[in-house]
Image (cartoon, rainbow, N blue to C red):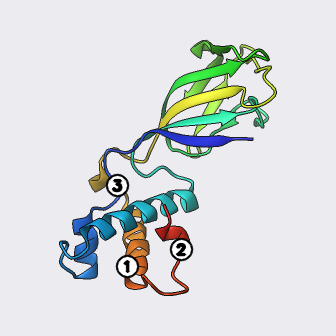
Amino acid sequence: MTTLTVITPPAALAATPADLAAYLRISQTDDASALATLIAAAHEQVQRETGQTLITTTWQEVRDAWAPVQPDGSLFLLTGPLQGVSLVETTDGTGVATEVDPAYYRPIIGAFPGEIAATTLAMRQPTARAAGLRIVYTAGLTSDPAQLPAPLKLAVLQLAAYCYQHRGEADAPIALIDR
């Protein structure tokens, strides 16, 4: 089993309430809180659908083992592009966690999906029955929302706008609204 948790959220989202208000051609003050919520939900949905982290975020990925691996021993992470790895840790059967020496792995910076390559040294496998490998890493296309590729920003705006325009309808996309 693999879980992915945000450790440090992005400093900003792909769009602002002012961006969405302009896109919708409404006054931002009308529903500023609702606009912010819709942007956050749309931002997450675009990340989920593309498998990419839009704005720099620090993640914690917990796995049972250094697996499944590619033929060369590398491990694909759940999101990317990878900006850096700050911790790889294995846990033994008694619950004691040990940091893996960075000499045993090599982050492939910019890789999408994120990838950590094994070095010629043998990777120490966790002996815990579950959740024995913890990786803390930073991923994202950019740290500056102004540098986000236009199609991705537009996707966030379109999803948020659609939800705004169809709020209260029985067939509204609840997955986008429900944070």
Query: Which label is found at residue 64?
Result: none
User: Badge 1 is on which residue?
Assistant: 164
Real-space CA distance between mark 1 and mark 2, rounded to the nearest whole angstrom: 11 Å
What amino acid is labelled 1 in the image? Tyr
For label 1, the SS is helix
Say which label, 3 or 2, has the lower sequence index: 3
Find residue 64 and report its horizontal and vertical position in percent: 75, 32
Q: Residue at x 31, y 53 (%)?
A: 145
Task: Locate residue 79 relative to residue 13 in the image: left or right.
Answer: right
Query: Which label is found at residue 13?
Result: 3
Say which label, 1 or 2, has the lower sequence index: 1
> Dot 1, how many residues are within 10 Å of its Cα: few (below 14), some (14-19), or many (20+)?
some
What amino acid is labelled 3 in the image? Leu
User: Badge 2 is on which residue?
Assistant: 174
> Dot 3, how many residues are within 10 Å of its Cα: few (below 14), some (14-19), or many (20+)?
many
For label 2, the SS is helix
Find residue 119 and report its horizontal and vertical position in percent: 67, 19
For label 3, the SS is loop
Is label 3 in contact with label 2 (beta carbons under 8 Å)?
no
Find residue 143 and report its horizontal and vertical position in percent: 33, 44
